[in-house]
Image (spheres, rainbow, N blue to C red):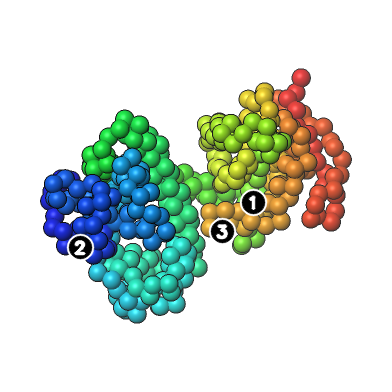
Amino acid sequence: MPRDERISLNEAARRAGVSAATLTRWADEKVIPVRKGRWTPAAAAQARVVARMRERGHSLDDLKEAGRDGKLAFGYSEDAFADTTEPVSISDAAAQSGLSEELIERIMVVLGTPAGRERTLTEVDVEALRLLASVADAGLPIEAVLQLVRVYAQAVRRIADAEVRLFHLFVHEPMMRDGLGALEMAEEMGSLVDSVSPTTTPLFEYLHDRYVRYFIEQDVVGHMEDEFGGDSGMDEIRISLCFVDLTGFTRFTEEEGDAEAFSVIEKFTEAAEATLPPEANIVKTIGDEVMVVSPDPVSLVEWAVGFLALFEDRPKPRAGVHYGGAVFRDGDYFGSQVNLAHRVVNRALGGEVLVTHAVAEAITEHEDLELDSLGAVDLKGFPEPTPLFLVRVRN
């Protein structure tokens, strides 16, 4: 539908979720900018946003000012992703998808939208459930299907959040600074979203296939090395675990402010991503901390030493590396060996790389690195002292 196509007052009211009389009053009071009484999809979208903000307790005067400034204009872009299919009950969704009502409830909880709150889904939801059912029918256990759903949900939620925030920063705010009218702004942003959104799925497929190929190769290599080097058990994989964080970051934030602290974290994370060896992978970032895994402890230590050398100013990063068995679940790694790696980094000073005995053995003969033994160190949560080693560049 063209952005400036006229729609009826009743259709605008249906889209906004309020009565026609309310829409007319909002238009008369200039809360919604309507050109010569002509309702358009953009104006109806503005009204829908106003209705939501009214439900949250905001006054019409405040909303009128926000609308005049263009702060509500981005809401129109939501139409590009709207689900307009018919509602479907949980029981009908179960019958159509072949999944039990209980399992559907579990899936919706994983997605962050418990079905129990509304008791209805849509035809789009049912089609997604059919796809999940086909995956289960192919032989993947239900628990594995749920883990996949959880990982997808967590990853795509972050992607969507980044898309919206970046669009706001680089498109919406510049338009507001340029003083564009609210409807013009809404229509321009809506057109841009319509142009950009079709690229999302092909780009996601490209990235997905690229990384699946990579991790299949890593899995094959890991199985071969386990076969020759000893398996740690059905539920565990042997992996090199590295935690890197910034020393004194809390104090740095207090002294320099949130904006500077955010800039430091952004540069810290980008540097980690840009310098990782090919076989390593960032599992997660939590504030000023990055968790990295790799099948190869030697290259991971080499990376950690080189990475820390990039930072001369405070807050300086520090690293802890361990090699051991870990349980993989929902795209993350768990277990006592992961906890051990995390405890190791907490004993390091800024600019230091500390490793456990399992890692030290792998790099003992390294021509560019040398080890200084710190002896057995007490680590919180571990009853026996843990031998730790400081890694230095060989002179």
Q: Residue 210, image x and y in percent?
A: 41, 43
- N-terminal label among 2 and 1: 2
Mark on residue 329? 3
- Give whichever of 261, 382 is nearer the camera: 261
Q: Quadrant of the C terminus?
A: top right
Mark on residue 238? 1
Disc 3 on helix, strand or loop? strand
For residue 256, what is the image quadrant?
Answer: top right
Residue 230 falls left or right of residue 90: right
Mark 3 surroundings within 10 Å by alpha-carbon count, few (fewer than 14), some (14 through 19), many (20 or more)? few
Disc 2 on helix, strand or loop? helix
Q: Residue 69, image x and y in percent?
A: 33, 40
Inter-mark Cα distance, 2 to 1: 64 Å
Q: Mark 2 belongs to which amino acid? A: Ala
Q: Residue at x 48, y 60 (%)?
A: 150
Q: Residue 284, image x and y in percent?
A: 56, 46
- N-terminal label among 3 and 1: 1
Inter-mark Cα distance, 3 to 1: 14 Å
- N-terminal label among 3 and 2: 2
Q: Mark 1 belongs to which amino acid? A: Arg
Mark 1 surroundings within 10 Å by alpha-carbon count, few (fewer than 14), some (14 through 19), many (20 or more)? many
Q: How many marks?
A: 3
Inter-mark Cα distance, 3 to 2: 51 Å
Image: 323 above or below 260: below
Q: Residue at x 68, y 51 (%)?
A: 338
> Circle 2 sits on which residue?
20
Q: Residue 218, image x and y in percent?
A: 52, 46
